[in-house]
Image (cartoon, grey):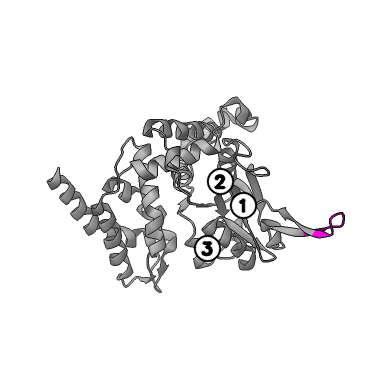
């Protein structure tokens, strides 16, 4: 629910974001681009899917984000961070919570599950069955869960960071398309540089004993105010929106694509573009933002036709003409 009186100056919103960034860069080395993507998701209310082999820092990144946030916020019982380890024997109620009979009151009482937190780490989400994976669908899409025909709202700041191992690794299940479409970004965590790995080895003791209390935590209300500011202050021109729609049309008509970019994906893209523009010191979205976020925004939402294997190339091909036309039109107007 939007509250315009919560808005703060754009520079103050940037400072709030930098407070979160300090925690992430202190805990993680060599992941500046991934950190920026996670910050964009946090500021735009999206969810993130991280993919790579074990040991690449996915879990540490999610934990550091949770530790950067203050507990509680406006509702009791809301933790800053909760982790769900997805395993083949996990049940949906292990995620959402369960109703337990209270003999003292003669009634059932809802016991919230770990999904009731600001940041939820869904660790190795593709190691459990599609039925359990789908337990997150309602939470991610509507910020609520329904148990025994009763709906329980989640906090407005609710963010899922899911990690998955590459498909084909033993014991993995593919995520269903409707769930993939709920993720704002899918990010591949590639190996860090040689210099970054040397720094990790040189500071391993310090990072193993990382104390988040040593850095100022960021409050829930401050982050929500920053979101509000970005939404109403960072300008998205009609040309940028037309460019988004034109890109989607080109990709949908590509013979290499079986199912193209959804309208929901375009809607989710707008606040993400605004957040990136703010992080880059601008109060307007440019084609640079769209070009930078194109692949992580849309690659996981494409169902490719038989024989096609590279969604990034398809997106870049489909976006080239629209981006060039929008850039030329902007330069002429200026």
Q: Percent from the top left, x then y, of residue 233?
A: 34, 41
Distance from disc 1 to disc 2, alpha carbons, whole Å, reads: 9 Å
Q: Position of residue 104 (x, y in %)?
A: 87, 54
Q: Name which of mark 1 and mark 3 comes first in the sequence.
A: 1
Q: Which residue is mark 3?
A: 179
Which mark is drawn over residue 58? 2
Q: Is residue 187 visible?
A: yes
Residue 90: quadrant of the picture? bottom right
Q: Tell me the residue at 53%/58% (across/down).
A: 142
Q: Earlier in the sequence, mark 2 or mark 3?
A: 2
> Vertically, is 43 above or below 101?
above
Residue 183 has which mark? none
The answer to which image quadrant residue 118 occupies is: top right
Residue 20 percent location from the top left of the image: 51, 35
Identify the residue at horizontal 63%, vertical 37% (top origin). 71
Q: In this orientation, which residue lies closer to the viewer: 157 or 171? A: 157
Q: How many marks?
A: 3
The residue identified by callout 1 is 123
Q: Position of residue 242 (x, y in %)?
A: 26, 58
How packed mark 3 is, by other alpha carbons closer than 10 Å (few <14, some 14-19, many 20 or more), is: some
- Determine whether the residue tagged by mark 1 lies in a helix, strand or loop: strand
Find numbered disc 3 in the image and state the secondary structure of the residue it sits on: helix
Q: Which residues are magenta?
A: 100-107
């Amino acid at each position: 629910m939007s509250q315009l009186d919560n808005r703060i100056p754009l520079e103050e919103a940037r400072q709030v974001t930098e407070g979160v960034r300090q925690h992430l860069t202190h805990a993680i080395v060599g992941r500046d681009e991934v950190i920026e993507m996670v910050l964009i998701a946090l500021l735009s209310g999206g969810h993130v899917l991280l993919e790579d082999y074990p040991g690449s820092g996915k879990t540490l990144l999610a934990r550091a984000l949770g530790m950067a946030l203050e507990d509680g916020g406006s509702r009791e019982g809301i933790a800053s961070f909760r982790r769900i380890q997805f395993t083949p024997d996990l049940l949906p109620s292990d995620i959402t919570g369960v109703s337990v009979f209270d003999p003292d009151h003669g009634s059932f009482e809802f016991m919230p599950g770990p999904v009731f937190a600001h940041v939820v780490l869904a660790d190795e989400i593709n190691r459990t069955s599609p039925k359990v994976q789908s337990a997150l669908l309602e939470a991610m899409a509507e910020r609520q869960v329904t148990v025994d025909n009763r709906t329980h709202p989640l906090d407005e700041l609710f963010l899922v960071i899911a990690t998955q191992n590459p498909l084909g690794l033993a014991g993995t299940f593919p995520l269903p398309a409707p769930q993939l479409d709920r993720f704002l970004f899918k990010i591949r965590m590639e190996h860090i540089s040689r210099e970054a790995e040397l720094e990790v080895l040189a500071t391993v003791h310090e990072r193993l004993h990382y104390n988040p209390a040593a850095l100022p935590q960021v409050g829930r209300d401050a982050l929500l105010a920053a979101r509000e500011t970005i939404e109403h202050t960072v300008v998205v021109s009609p040309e940028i929106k037309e460019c988004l729609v034109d890109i989607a049309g080109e990709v949908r008509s590509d013979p290499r694509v079986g199912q193209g970019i959804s309208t929901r994906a375009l809607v989710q893209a707008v606040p993400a573009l605004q957040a990136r523009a703010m992080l880059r010191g601008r109060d307007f979205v440019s084609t640079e933002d769209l070009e930078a976020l194109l692949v992580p925004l849309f690659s996981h939402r494409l169902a490719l036709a038989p024989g096609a294997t590279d969604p990034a190339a398809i997106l870049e091909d489909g976006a080239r003409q629209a981006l060039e036309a929008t850039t030329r039109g902007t330069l002429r107007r200026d």
